Image (spheres, rainbow, N blue to C red):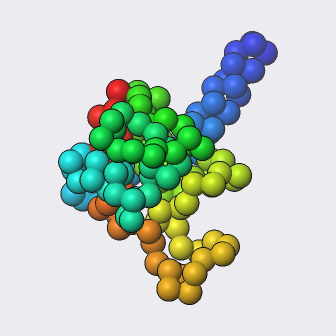
Amino acid sequence: MRAAAVALILMANIAAHAAADTMDTPLTDVPGDATRGRTIVLNRQLGLCLLCHSGPFPEERFQGNMAPDLSGAGARWSEGQLRLRLVDGRRVNPQTLMPSYRRTDGLERVGAAWQGKAVLSAQQVEDVVAFLRTLR
């Protein structure tokens, strides 16, 4: 009986942790477009992803090496996990250097021109998620 109770508590803790690591509800009613997402990821003025990440983009020179390689991202993380990391990666790792692409409050060292503005629109986040899911 006690073993069953311990197992239930363990399963509840695992489920609670998993829920904290995901954002399952899409930000828009329009599904993400992987082609647009790829454009955002490779754009050094918009997504800025390749400043820190590398990936299966042989046409792109000077890819980053400070963050995980995006190769296989769609196999490593679920759609909800990817979405949360883009929206507010600090909810997963409070020490992350990755910017919060949708969060606008409680940020430090934000230039006056960008205060209160999200880096990406909700649709752009969904597009990037759709693209990253293709990287298996």
Instruction: Compare residues 77 and 49 and report the one nearer the observer.
Output: 49
Q: Residue at x 52, y 67 (%)?
A: 103
Q: Which x, y percent locates residue 94?
A: 69, 53
Q: Residue 3 sits in which quadrant?
A: top right
* Above or below: residue 107 compared with residue 19: below
Instruction: Compare residues 128 and 24 and report the one nearer the observer.
Output: 128
Residue furthest to the front: 61
* Above or below: residue 53 compared with residue 29: above
Instruction: Compare residues 45 and 32 and report the one nearer the observer.
Output: 45
> Relative to residue 36, is residue 96 drawn left or right?
right
Q: Which x, y percent locates residue 74?
A: 38, 33
Q: Residue at x 33, y 36 (%)?
A: 58
Q: Residue at x 45, y 52 (%)?
A: 49
Instruction: Compare residues 78 and 41 and report the one nearer the observer.
Output: 41
Q: Residue at x 53, y 48 (%)?
A: 52
Quadrant assignment for the N terminus: top right
Q: Which x, y percent locates residue 36?
A: 23, 54
Residue 51 visible in rendering: yes
